[in-house]
Image (spheres, rainbow, N blue to C red):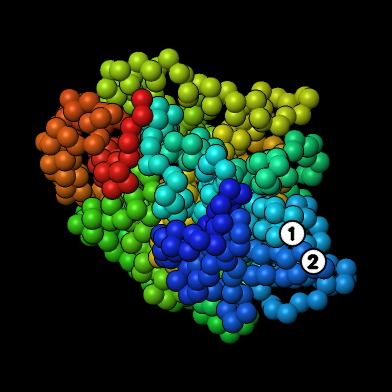
Amino acid sequence: MCGIAGMIDFSQDIRQQQKTAEQMQNTIIRRGPDQKGIFLTEHAGLIHTRLAVIDPENGKQPMQLTDGDERYTIIYNGELYNTQEIRKQLLAEGCEFVTHSDTEVLLRAYMLYREDCVKLCNGIFAFAVWEEKKQRLFLARDRIGVKPLFYYQTDTGLIFASELKAILAHPSVPHEMDMNGISQILLFGPGRTPGCGVFRNMKEILPAHCACYTREKGLEISCYWKLKAEEHTENFSQTAEHVRFLLTDAIKRQLVSDVPVGTFLSGGLDSSLISSVAAREFSEKNKILHTFSVDYKENDKYFRKSKFQPNSDPEFIRRMQEYLHAEHHWTVIETPQLVRALFDAVDARDLPGMVDVDASLLLFCKEIKKHVTVALSGECADELFGGYPWYRDPEIRAAYGFPWSQSTAYRLQFAKPEIREILESRQDIDREYQATLRKTALLMQESDTEKRMKEMMRLNLDWFMQTLLDRKDRMSMWNALEVRVPFCDYRIAQYLYNIPWEFKEYKGYEKGLLREAMKEYLPEEILWRKKSPYPKTHHPDYLAAVTKLLEDRISNPDAPVLQIIRKEALEKLMYGEENMQFYGQLMTKPQTIAYFLQMDYWLEKYQIKICL
């Protein structure tokens, strides 16, 4: 994995912008500390920081190749999991290769097929190609949106990068937030509207989209893939077999690396399946898999069962340790560490985020990086197989609005009166919810249940899952750890989209189809364990610590957050008894307090000007 950034400007000589390029590069150096490179030509600058995973010796970027009188330069962040198939196809077309890197495969595919090259790719990626003679920039992002790609248009050019901070490092980009940005952080946060970069005029290339930028036509964006509604013709047994093939194939493909690989292991279904498949692959090669788990100091003492978190992870992790015969590593986080990391997590995400869930992952990834450079994780199984409570609870499922964030009125009461009035009139939540439903691909004759399940999957893929992928990318890459997510293979997404709900809910279990399909890979107590979300701290010291920090911040009448948020509402949050869910099941009172603490830090750290 890597960090990419670039700038196009047809009104000036970018070769004079070396200092700006270096400033942008420095902001994303944590994503790729192994190598760095800058390519500057008259109207284009391409910037790269590399985390070497495949062909460390020969994959340096920016990479250049020529064909006739055209020179192509690529910067690329990601991994292709079908590199060999594409290479074989290109060899048959007469291409010759000088490296073993997937970067060269991708660049030669672009040279031969232009924008259609992305249709060949199974992987996670964001990349840019500059064609010198044509003075043309091509940008693309993977189908699911695992790798990020933001951009900002100026009057005379385009600035883009893997992370917001790199774009903000450019002197032409103001650090501003208008009412749209306020809406994002207050009503949608820690999620955000697809394509929105929160800062004023900051945008994001959507998943499964590519773009061309030229002097004559400016920025032209197009979609190259979308989920299709198709009749599912396989019976349950055939469906389970198909799922087993797709998932094991995705995991095996994503174990390919020239550097050490491990797996996240929570003791839940998804990470345990990935670890089990990986362990078998490693065993065949006489290698030992490294697995990694996280917990919090004294969490066993303060853990309380709930509808959403029926049991804690450690006993199940220990059972998987016995089953896998892997080399296991525990990370135990203490409350003061977790609180301090709230601010590093904002620096990593460039936005307020999922607070302690972000912070703990950031600390966890730091420990994992001491042992491996690549780790596989179980994100996105719940979105595809229907594992979340909002898929399975008929009342929540039928409710209007985003199921993980039903608290619009609760969120609005934090806003200052003049801001609340504007936000209420805008009706952003309703507009975006309806727009997502309209995008849902349906068959002509869908039952009400199947229609709603497709809508739920569309909502989850476009919104909730993107928040989790943002979190996983920023927290891991802050530590130069590449995290791969096998469930995000687009083939799995497309196949699962059309499977009937009665199959997915086999035997009345959440993700029953997945359990049945993969039953040979897990012990019974793990296979049928009830879903438990990513672990969070239950220690009362955490609530006390974030409350004290927010108290101190808002005791200053010039606290940045008070430009947007009512002090009285924050005091009610801190000292009252109300414990509303702010975002999904993981953000309640302590996390909501921490979210406003992050918001205040973010406004100050990034020197954001509020433009109402």
Write down the quadrant of residue 99 in the picture.
bottom right
Q: Residue at x 56, y 56 (%)?
A: 13
Quickly name the residue at label 1.
133
Q: Residue at x 37, y 42 (%)?
A: 175
Instruction: Confirm whether residue 414 shows in the render.
Output: yes
Q: Nearer the viewer, residue 134 or 562?
A: 134
Residue 22 lies, in percent from the top left, at 44, 64
Q: Nearer the viewer, residue 18 or 295?
A: 18
Classify mark 2: helix, strand or loop: loop
Residue 194 lies, in percent from the top left, at 54, 37
134 with respect to 315 (left or right): right
Q: Residue at x 54, y 46 (%)?
A: 151
Q: Quadrant of the N terminus?
A: bottom right
Q: Are marks 2 and 1 in contact (CB under 8 Å)?
A: yes
User: Which class describes the residues within 10 Å of circle 1: few (<14), some (14-19), or many (20+)?
Assistant: few
In the image, residue 79 above or below residue 155? below
Q: Nearer the viewer, residue 291 or 255?
A: 255
Quickly name the residue at label 2.
69
